[in-house]
Amino acid sequence: MHDYDLIVIGAGSGNMLFTDEMTRMRTAIVEPDRFGGTCLNRGCIPSKMLVVAADAALAVEESARLGVHARLERVDWPAIRARVFGRIDPLHEQSVAYRRASGVDVFTEPARFIGPRQIQVGDRAITGEQIVVASGSRPAIPAIPGLDGVEFHTSDTIMRIAEVPRSMAVIGGGFIAAEMGHVFAAFGSAVSIVQRGPRLLMAEDEAVSQRFTDQAARRFDLHLDTVVTSVERSATGVAVTVTGPAGPAVLDVEVLLVAAGRQPNTDLLDATAAGLALDAHGHLVTDETYRTNVAGVWSLGDATNHFQLKHMANAEMRVLTHNLIHPEALRRLPTGLAPHAVFSHPQIAGVGLTEAQAVEQGIDHVVAVRPYSDTAYGWALEDTESFVKLVADPTTRLLLGAHIIGPQAATLLQPLLQGMMLGLTVDQLGREVLYVHPALTEVVEQALLEL
Ligand SMILES: Cc1cc2nc3c(=O)[nH]c(=O)nc-3n(C[C@H](O)[C@H](O)[C@H](O)COP(=O)(O)OP(=O)(O)OC[C@H]3O[C@@H](n4cnc5c(N)ncnc54)[C@H](O)[C@@H]3O)c2cc1C
Ligand SMILES: NC(=O)c1ccc[n+]([C@@H]2O[C@H](COP(=O)([O-])OP(=O)(O)OC[C@H]3O[C@@H](n4cnc5c(N)ncnc54)[C@H](O)[C@@H]3O)[C@@H](O)[C@H]2O)c1
């Protein structure tokens, strides 16, 4: 007899697994940190709350092109920070109290496996009929000489910083560099970004990545094809020595932000003690129903997938909730499509194949690119740089990929994503659907009609 019917390790997306159907089950959740996990406490939510404030600050500067002349008077960082975390921080205690009240045992020390369905939590060894590993991921820290001797930030800490620094260097050119670079530049920091590749956001369609990089070069001190060779303390804060096409250089900044990807927390779990299979990056290997190779052990979210996106973790959580209670009728996620959005300035959103991937994979395809400036709302915005790019199969007329850079990109992606997930052709999406005039969605309609 196991101690519990269900043990969940990690109270990020894992905390949402419990349903009314489980009230008769003996359940426990293990979370040594704050309930809500990365997304709520140090990820999606605080970062987007900051991005909205940054967008507002930038809009003041950018409104001159519309004939509105305004000046940014002051950015009240303590007030912005208090607004964000004043809303988020109380939720931890409330969530713990709610779980306990609903009959779930809450353990507040880290879990580690000591057997296939057995974990050690503090001085207790407990067993579960079923165990879900939802232990997420943490910032990966690259091996850079001197890094352990200086004070540096990751996304875990940068959003709670005491004041907006005069200068900041970011190592990495991905999601976090794009979003946090935007936030701190909008609030007045001089931001340098050091990216080892030739463009920022290299995983995007090349045209999107290039356009973003061109725009970023006007806001940031951009170091492309550049590596950080060492860091050391300086009178300013941190001296970051880099080597790039122009030779070596030193960026002397107040604050260093390391944003070089994330690694799953499975190494802290002693997953091998349970016999759990890990892939080369340390993600737990599961099948499409989120079963691991060990009977009764499941996994979801950043611990197991490479998407590292909250809506994917949420979707997996919904499937897994069903599978835990209905082992006789296991569900899978309905599609392999994983949309994403980067909430920078400009915004980016994408799903499916890039043009380069279609070429590499030898997939017959057609491409349409439509600038925002071809639409009435694009005129209103005085936009000259944003666009929608679609990749489609010329035979089936189905969309293979959609890539957008510009205002409201994440929202504009949604009708395309819906079409892809529901198996609609570009003709159905473009010709059989009405688009409100003169909304920005007309750029989506026009791109579809071009295919
Ligand atoms: C700055 C930032 C911004 C982001 N913005 C977005 C966004 O806009 N949109 C989006 O889709 N995604 C975004 N993400 C990604 C998103 O936050 C993650 O994909 C998501 O939080 C993953 O959820 P999870 O439940 O798998 O893991 P987590 O939310 O990380 O939860 C895992 C939990 O497990 C706990 N844990 C770890 N080890 C143990 C252990 N040994 N025992 C018990 N518990 C343990 C952790 O303390 C944590 O609370 C962002 C991430 C970051 C860092
Ligand atoms: N809007 C969103 O959905 C959102 C926002 C922020 C973060 N996230 C999630 O969090 C993850 C982490 O974000 P991120 O920006 O840290 O990672 P990322 O994977 O987006 O980008 C990592 C960057 O670090 C660089 N890099 C990797 N190793 C390096 C090294 N050793 N030295 C120098 N540079 C190195 C890479 O070239 C890349 O530019 C993202 O992959 C994403 O899944 C999502």
Image (cartoon, rainbow, N blue to C red):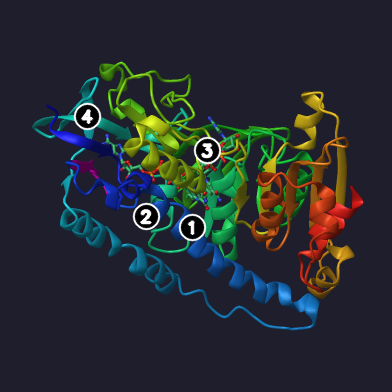
- On screen, residue 335 versus residue 312, left or right, reads right
Q: Is residue 28 magenta?
A: yes
Q: Check if mark 2's residue and mark 1's residue have beta carbons within 8 Å.
A: no
Assign a secondary structure to mark 3.
loop
C-beta proximity under 8 Å, tags 3 and 1 = no
- Identify the disc placed on residue 260: none
Q: Is residue 257 left or right of residue 107?
A: right
Q: Residues within 10 Å of mark 1 (few under 14, many from 20)?
A: many
User: Image quadrant of residue 387?
Assistant: bottom right
Residue 8 placed where, x, y %?
Answer: 27, 39
Q: Amino acid at mark 1?
A: Ser
Counting from the top left corner in percent of width and height, residue 119 is at: 19, 28
For the residue pair 307 and 213, the one nearer the viewer reads as: 307
- Above or below — where is 413 with respect to 272? below
Which label's residue is closer to the chain start, 4 or 3? 4
- Provide the secondary structure element on which disc 2 rests: helix
Q: Is residue 29 left or right of 401 when viewed as pictured? A: left
Q: Crowding near pointer 2: few (<14 within 10 Å), some, many (20+)?
A: many
Disc 4 from disc 1: Cα separation? 37 Å
Instruction: Provide the residue designation for mark 1.
Output: 47
- Which dot marks residue 129? 4
Name the residue located 41 percent from the left edge and 74 percent from the top edge: 79
State which mark lies toward you, 2 or 3: 3
- Check the image and name the residue furthest to the front: 328
The amino acid type found where label 2 is placed reads Asn
Magenta segment boundaries in residue numbering: 27-34
